[in-house]
Amino acid sequence: EALKVVARCRPMSRKEEAAGYERVLELDVKLGQVSIRNPRASPGELPKTFTFDAVYDASSKQADLYDETVRPLIDSVLQGFNGTIFAYGQTGTGKTYTMQGAWAEPEKRGIIPISFEHIFTHISRSQNQQYLVRASYLEIYQEEIRDLLAKDQSKKLELKENPETGVYIKDLSSFVTKNVKEIEHVMNLGSQTRSVGSTNMNEHSSRSHAIFLITIECSETGPDGEEHIRVGKLNLVDLAGSERQSKMGAHGERPKEASKINLSLSALGNVISALVDGKSTHIPYRDSKLTRLLQDSLGGNAKTIMVATLGPASHSYDESLSTLRFANRAKNIKNKPRVNEDPKDTLLREFQEEIVRLKAQLEKRGMLGKKRRRSSRRKKAVDGESAMENEGEDDNEDGLEKNMENYLKEQKERLEEEKAAIQDDHSLVSEEKQKLLQEKEKMIEDLRKEQEATELLATKYKAMESKLLIGGRTIVDHTNEQQKMLELKRQEIAEQKRREREMQQEMLLRDEETMELRETYTSLQQEVEIKTKKLKKLYAKLQAVKAEIQDQHDEYIRVRQDLEEAQNEQTRELKLKYLIIENFIPPEEKNKIMNRLYFDGEEDQWKFQPLVPTGGNQMKKRPTSAVGYKRPISQYARVAMAMGSHPRYRVSERALV
């Protein structure tokens, strides 16, 4: 199925209104079209029009976007599909507002918090199903992956690839959540450590790409009577905004951050272009960490929604046009989503197996208690005591815990009685009495340890079972039947709007195609007039196509200039490191570093070989396989690449000058 693309335009900001910028965007919500007018164009130039799956103007509500566009995707994730939602656009156009919104105000809550409620409400209403929901939160800051939920924020995570499960992040922390409050807490913890900063374009600009990953595992009994597990993965992506160095007006780390952001977004654009082209034999997923993580979402096993966010003001014309073109290309990507049924690495299966094992241990202890009670009663009956009182005891016990408590209590009482009987028996020699008392004390101590072990086992069993969400039982169903009906009606209305929009778009296309066939002329003069109008219309279209070609050329030049700026910045940084190597690093140290360097093809970066002795004091041999091979490169460049994280050679530019 095709990647779903929707466009959303924010209102004019106070700063834009005060500066006197004009509005260049017009949105037709019913037709799903966005028209953009060039403020520098001649009066006769037509605006450029783009058609998307849905369009949301400045007056649109968060709930409208969610119900019409996002809700069907979340339902698919709950059925076991992979899903991705990502917001793309220039900085300051409302990507973070669309994805997260204002948490404190219910009407302004974004896609992420509404999806939390949707997921757990669905679980609470389900029947005869077990769920396990876990969450992870990461960011890509300057092409380095950071776990936003980890205690050590300085640790850089590695991307790995598995033939069965695809691309994954090694050592990424994951938290099991049982309700909306818990998953919101996880989200808030991660948001506190996310990289944000202030620029001329946006006071609270995201300086990294953030991905909130929700994994939903569902277990239910199939028609064959066997337990089947489905796993749906939801990627909620808040991309950092593309930005021009000239408009950003920032210093220090900001230009470097912007350079890395633009490079990763450029790589994303290249991947989309290669997928749409159809002729490309190679898709450059490995060009950035962002595209590798979104590999399944772009042309793979996932249902994907892209929200293109736009700025309406004339000073954002170039950026808005670039975003619209990017989104228009993305519409043509085809994905192949499928249900992830019975995968091998499900945590839910591990939890279920552990629960069964713990339950078996508890039952074993409970059954042992019953057997010992029966043997105790038989002994009392043989001794002439009446056992009639205890006959109905087993029938009245209804739970495992009661069995254990009764058994442990009985055993303790019996041992105490036997201990008292030994002390009262004057016929025993003192040494024998002492020996018997010690044995009874040891038995009482063993009983106490058994009790503690049983309690620990029961606690562990309850804790494991509490992590599984059982539809209609574990989560309190706080929504009544009327709310459920209201949601269904909202979904029906959203579906009806979508169908109407598609029909109108189809009718427009057909009208253009069949207009010529329907026309009849009463005279030659009328035919000449109508055909002249058509000719003018076609000429206007030709001019629009020529203007589009020129715009594309201008856009290419701008992108090239941005890349050249980034290249110059990196060259300057590399020259600085060359200078440090020449003047501050002794030749023998440089040679040691060079001998330890090797290129890791899997992670696409240079690494230090660890100092592992192999027999003598020699270092471990550098690998020559495809995974880690020695790439030919300048000796200084190799040392400089490795120096970025080497604390010994960290010299500031000012100190060097």
Image (tube, helix red, strand yellow):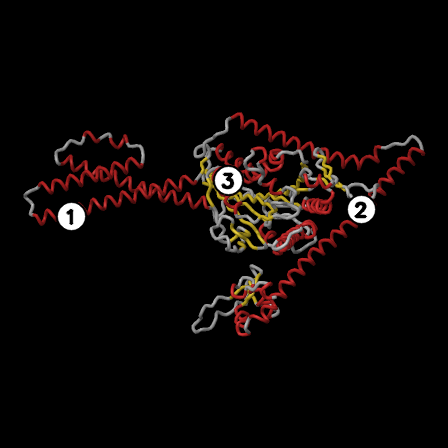
Residue identified by numbered label 3: 184
- Badge 1 local density, few (<14 within 10 Å), some, or many (20+)? few
- Badge 3 local density, few (<14 within 10 Å), some, or many (20+)? some
Labels 1 and 2: the sequence-earlier one: 1
Q: Residue 438's mark? A: 1
Q: Secondary structure at mark 2?
A: helix
Q: Is residue 148 above or below residue 629?
A: above
Q: Residue at x 49, y 33 (%)?
A: 126
Q: Nearer the viewer, residue 549 or 4?
A: 549
Marks 2/3: CA–CA distance = 48 Å
Residue 9, by quadrant, is top right
Kindly check if marks 1 and 3 are in contact, taking CB atoms under 8 A apart as contact. Answer: no
Q: Identity of the amino acid at label 1? A: Gln
Q: Residue 545's mark? A: 2
Q: Nearer the viewer, residue 330 or 352?
A: 330
Q: Is residue 1 visible?
A: no
Q: Secondary structure at mark 3?
A: helix
Q: Residue at x 44, y 44 (%)?
A: 349
Percent position of residue 247, x then y: 69, 50
Marks 1/3: CA–CA distance = 57 Å
Q: How many numbered callouts?
A: 3
Q: Identity of the amino acid at label 2? A: Val
Q: Nearer the viewer, residue 592 or 248?
A: 248
Percent position of residue 19, x then y: 72, 41
Check the picture and name the quadrant holding the C terminus.
bottom right
Check the picture and name the quadrant holding the N terminus.
top right
- Badge 2 local density, few (<14 within 10 Å), some, or many (20+)? few
Marks 1/2: CA–CA distance = 101 Å
Q: Secondary structure at mark 1?
A: helix
Q: Is residue 578 left or right of residue 154?
A: right
Labels 1 and 3: the sequence-earlier one: 3
